[in-house]
Amino acid sequence: MSAVEGSAAGSGAAALVATDVTKRFGSVEALRGLSVTVREGEIYGLLGPNGSGKTTFIRCVAGLVRPDAGSLALWGGEPREAVAAGRVGYMTQAAALYVELSVEENLGFFAALEGVDGVRQRIEEVLRTVDLLDRRRSVVGTLSGGMRQRVSLAAALLHDPRLLLLDEPTVGVDPTLRRDFWDHFRGLATRGVTILVSSHVMDEAGRCDRLGLIRDGRVLAEGSAKELVARAGTADLESAFLTLSEGATA
Ligand SMILES: Nc1ncnc2c1ncn2[C@@H]1O[C@H](COP(=O)(O)OP(=O)(O)O)[C@@H](O)[C@H]1O
Ligand SMILES: [Mg+2]
């Protein structure tokens, strides 16, 4: 087990341990030895530019992509076992909703796929969590981008997962809603849900307990936003990212 320093939350056991994970798609090396440990109740941010391997890694954690090498365990077991046991929720980068169906019809469909018990009540609960209860009968195609993102989050929460994978969840969401989203994430983490969230937006990164700066399929540096800025000796995280990536390739 690795010792992890300096974060406010996530003092529990390791939920996710990835060690030297590699994945190649033909000639593209998407992951080149990525190592990350995320503890229960922690919000861990994968921060990196497009093409750095964030989605590929999240898909490995979701059991959808098998690493070529390295190890990846959820609570000490195979990702697929944790997924089969309903412990993992995944909000994909592109919304996977039926635009011609209503919000509650969409959630009913996903609840059936997940074998959720007490469907009506559970749909109400998750819609309350994302503040969309009053739009339950709206057709998804008529909703704003931010509302759709909230429906996607609600869908990922239906089966009450212990680990939530959020792939760029706030893309296309305005600043106010983005803040609400992060409040939801923090609320979930406070209740013990572990969150792995990817972003290429630096200003959100401060909301994570710890960050892994990802480039070219590996973690360049890890720590809280404050720690990373201090280590790089820069004014903000964006410059810290650049400074730390130069250091890593020098
Ligand atoms: N299924 C795939 N087939 C071929 N190449 C892929 C596939 N998935 C991802 N890649 C490539 O792997 C690299 C990492 O992509 P991705 O994990 O989507 O990065 P990010 O989410 O950080 O933008 C990119 O070069 C991308 O084109
Ligand atoms: Mg991606």
Image (cartoon, rainbow, N blue to C red):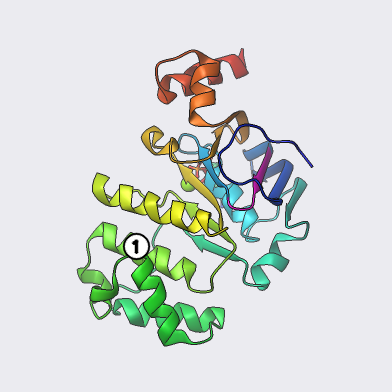
Residue for point 50% across, 16% down: 243
Does residue 233 appear to the left or right of 63 in the view shown? left
Task: Please identify the quadrant where the C terminus is shown.
Answer: top right
Q: Quadrant of the N terminus?
A: top right
Q: Position of residue 127 (x, y in %)?
A: 35, 72
Provide the secondary structure element on which disc 1 rests: helix
* 37 is within the stretch colored magenta: yes
**One can see residue 58 in this view:** yes
Residue 215 drawn above or below residue 127? above
* Foreground pick, 93 / 122: 122
In this view, the residue in front, 205 or 167, is 205
Question: Residue beneath label 1, please?
Answer: 150
Magenta stretch encompasses residue 250:
no
Image point (41%, 63%), residue name: 153
* Residue stretch rendered in magenta on the structure: 35-41
Q: Quadrant of residue 132?
A: bottom left
Other residues around mark 1 within 10 Å, as few (<14) / some (14–19) / many (≥20): many
Which of the 4 image quarters holds residue 29? top right
